Amino acid sequence: MYQVLARKYRPKIFDEIIGQDAIIQTLKNAVINDRISHAYIFTGTRGIGKTSIARILAKSVNCINGPTVNPCGICSACVQIQNGSSVDVIEIDGASNTGVDSIRDLKESIIYSPQSFRFKIYIIDEVHMLSNSAFNALLKTLEEPPAHAKFIFATTEIHKVPETILSRCQRFNFRRITTKVIFEKLKEIAVAEGVFATDENLMIIASLADGSLRDSLSILDTAISYFGKVIKEDVSPVLGLTAKAIIFNLIGAIFRKDYENSLKAARELYDSGADVRQFMKQAAFYIRNILIVKLKYKDLIYDLTDEEINGLIPFAEQKSAEELLDMIDIMLNADIKYQRVSSPLLMLELTIFRLFNIPSKNDVREFIDRLEKFTESRNNDETSKALPRRDSENSGAGKSKGRNKEFSENLNLEHGTPDEKKQENNASSEREKLFDHFSKTDEKLNGQDKQADKYDINSIIKIRTDGDAVGKTINAEETGERKNKLIDDAIVIDNIKEIFGNSIERIDKK
Ligand SMILES: [Zn+2]
């Protein structure tokens, strides 16, 4: 009969537990020094070894060779505890309806010595689910426990456990198991099971398990039942994820500013039946990884093989950190921004267009400089009471021509054409273009549709860079050195770790 992997590979001794080294060491010392506390509480997310360790501890103290850190696994105590048939090691599920009754029974039976073992051990899983009356009953026994009784509580929600209970327990906070550690374990188990799976696939499974070894094994089970013993093809679609290849193609096309192929890739993604919103999260995480490669913090990439990480380097070289942050923001906010768009495909396409049009911060800087020069020339115009729209038929034609030349130079326009009229037309159409571009940039940065007065520079140079790391407003009133400094500040990332934290947090919140 097929036994599910999570059950088959459930740790039976301390040394088989992975990812909880400090806890294991402390418990081993307690066993060796015969200083086992009368009550423990294990807290942490699911599938990281809480109940496994509780059972191993129960075996350690009750094994015929015990107390020992290496319970034999074959004596009657070990065997009974392992298959849950022992009368002296009582497992109670706090989440079940029988919780209160069990605690009532517990209160009555705890005074009797163990029938065959050294210790009576009560393992209460999901202890936070107990009712108030059950907690009160439990508290009574915890206040004066008989010497032959030990308690081990496990919970995923420690904040729901009353302080009065917590204060009587030794507490252990279980860690999420890192993706790399889960990956290594999966590799080992795949070999033991005679399953061939690519590293990329095992990495996908490990990262999907989100810190839980048990979950990772259940996912591996799913993959095995779909693919059999050879898992070469991308497992993502089977697990409800977008295939990595599709993400890779789409992101690649966006980075190349290749409209055609990015729209094709979007269509492919949509046709494959992938969940577009889920894809956005995956893609945001993908770009987050590119950002991390860019910042040379490779150790903070948890879900890719070394080979895959190297594949991100060319991407990282193409964009600034700020641009990558903007891309992440756009993808994570697409959900909200396009909530009224009923077609997921359209939402995806609109998001892609926005990704294409992220203004680089250098562009912004350059535009400010150019606009400033332009303002100067325009102010000169105003002092001489010239109209903003230059008119060469004016009496001040000569002067105006000179200014026009200067103006054109400032805007890097082509000039020197003998035809003054043409030159002027060029100048004004270039000026229009510049303003257009700049108001769009401004609009993008501010996320608002603002019809800026095209000739009022103060309303245009109002740059607000988005994102937590660069969230500074530069007032139009600022001038000279100080303004330059503000702009510099705005584009400097001063706390890399904070950015990682924020982007991770933002992803988690979704
Ligand atoms: Zn034993």
Image (tube, helix red, strand yellow):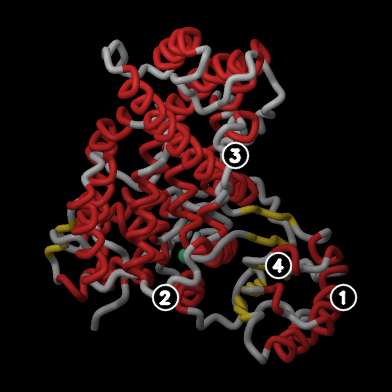
Q: Is residue 255 left or right of residue 469?
A: left
Lower position in the chain sequence, tag 3 or tag 1: 1
- Image height of 84 relative to 437, above or below: below
| Residue ID for mark 3 | 453
Residue at position x 79%, y 87% in the image: 108
Mark 1 and mark 2: Cα distance apart in space: 58 Å
Viewed as shown, does residue 500 lie left or right of 486?
left
Residue ID at (66%, 14%):
383
| Residue type for callout 1 | Lys
| Type of the residue with mark 2 | Ser
Residue for badge 2: 342
Say what secondary structure mark 4 lies in.
Answer: strand
Q: Is the residue marked by circle 1 packed among few (<14), some (14-19), or many (20+) residues within 10 Å?
A: few
Residue 150's disc number: 4
Query: From mark 4 to mark 2, how far is it between C-alphas?
Result: 57 Å
Q: CA distance from mark 3 to mark 4?
A: 76 Å
| Crowd class of label 2 (few under 14; some 14 to 19; many from 20; radius 10 Å) | few
Q: Which residue is mark 1?
A: 140
Labels 1 and 4: the sequence-earlier one:
1
